[in-house]
Image: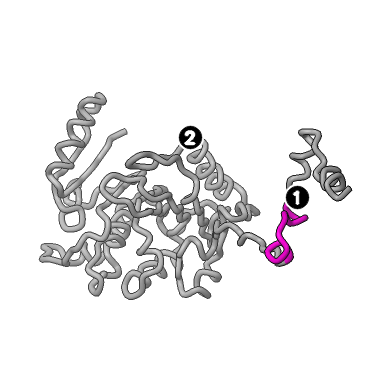
Amino acid sequence: MRLYGQDNNGGVWAICKMNLLLHGIPNAVLQNDDTLMVPIKEGGNLKHYDRILSNPPFSQNYSRGNKDNPMEFIDRFRVFCATSGKADLMFAQHMLAVLKQDGIMATVMPHGILFRGGEEKKIRQLFIEEDNLEAVIGLPPQLFYGTGIPACILVMRPRGAKPKATQGKVLFINADAEFQTGRAQNSLRPEHIEKIVSAYEDFTTNADYLGIPGYAAVVTQQQLADYEYNCNIRRYADNTPPPEPQDVRSHLLGGVPKSEVDAKQELFTSHGFDPMTLLQRRKG
């Protein structure tokens, strides 16, 4: 197994190099260069990978620039984000273009790429129509260094590479409410990660998997097309708690609503306490 990496930021590249050396990985191929403009090559051709994991910079500005090989550029980027000038989905297109046919990729992205219009909508449509997009996982806020905004993970495969159970469908997981709060940064506990992984694995192995209410939802290509390729996670997996019921009689006359007492009856019983008996004593 060989590890490849690339980053245009010299400081990040140096830290990564030292980190790998400290963990006993001296032979990784790490390049300090622009991934979009100067991708890693092997024998003059683009290097292709079995697995790709990436956390590209959010909403980084970019320009097309000058290319010695314009056809290669067109092959990697079928849609240019000329209007927004944001590189988020340009990175996603690049990663998809350098995957092997049986490969799989997962990349961290800002939520804006899920619903913005223009060229980004065209890219989402392309990903969905060609059945590249397999899962969209919403993460909690303040999970990453340098930004407090919530992010998402896109899980993607080359065209025709999805397992039979997931073909023509996309799994949406809304995990933004399940995390451990930290002083400056939040984190995922093992049980939070296990729940995400379990939902994803059930989706990839069971064609009849329907999801988890309020957490995970399986959405078809046609449903996404009906919503104009809007991939906003909460549209499909809404974890908003139900509104608190209001008892008008209690608001007017005071006291505790009977519905609230009934809802806690199991707890009362476990402690040997009967609120109705107490109420009758007071009336007596």
* Range covered by the magenta-colored residues: 249-261
Q: Is residue 251 above or below residue 181?
A: below
Q: Is residue 42 above or below residue 83?
A: above
Amino acid beneath label 1: Val
Give the image quarter of residue 86: bottom left
Mark 2 lies on residue: 190
| SS class, disc 2 | helix
Q: Which circle marks residue 17 in the picture?
A: none
Secondary structure mainly formed by the magenta segment: helix
Residue 259 covered by magenta stretch: yes
The quadrant of the rendering that contains the N terminus is top left
Give the image quarter of residue 145: top left
Place of residue 39 in the rendered image (x, y in percent of width and height, measured from the top left) = 19, 52
Colour scheme in use: one colour
User: Which residue is painted at 58% across and 46% down in the image?
Assistant: 202
Mark 2 in CB contact with mark 1 (< 8 angstroms):
no
Q: Is residue 200 above or below residue 118?
A: above
User: Which residue is painted at 38% across and 53% down in the image?
Assistant: 150
Question: Which mark is nearer the camera, 2 or 1?
Answer: 1
Q: Which circle marks residue 261 in the picture?
A: 1
Camera-side residue of 258 and 16: 258
Mark 2 vs mark 1, CA separation in Å: 36 Å
Residue 207 seen anywhere in this rendered image of the structure:
no
Residue 177 seen anywhere in this rendered image of the structure:
yes
Camera-side residue of 258 and 138: 258
Place of residue 138 in the rendered image (x, y in percent of width and height, measured from the top left) = 45, 53
Amino acid beneath label 2: Pro
Place of residue 237 in the rendered image (x, y in percent of width and height, measured from the top left) = 54, 59
User: Which residue is painted at 53% across and 58% down in the image?
Assistant: 167
The 10 Å Cα crowd at callout 2, few under 14, some 14 to 19, many 20 or more, is few
Residue 219 vs residue 267: left or right?
left
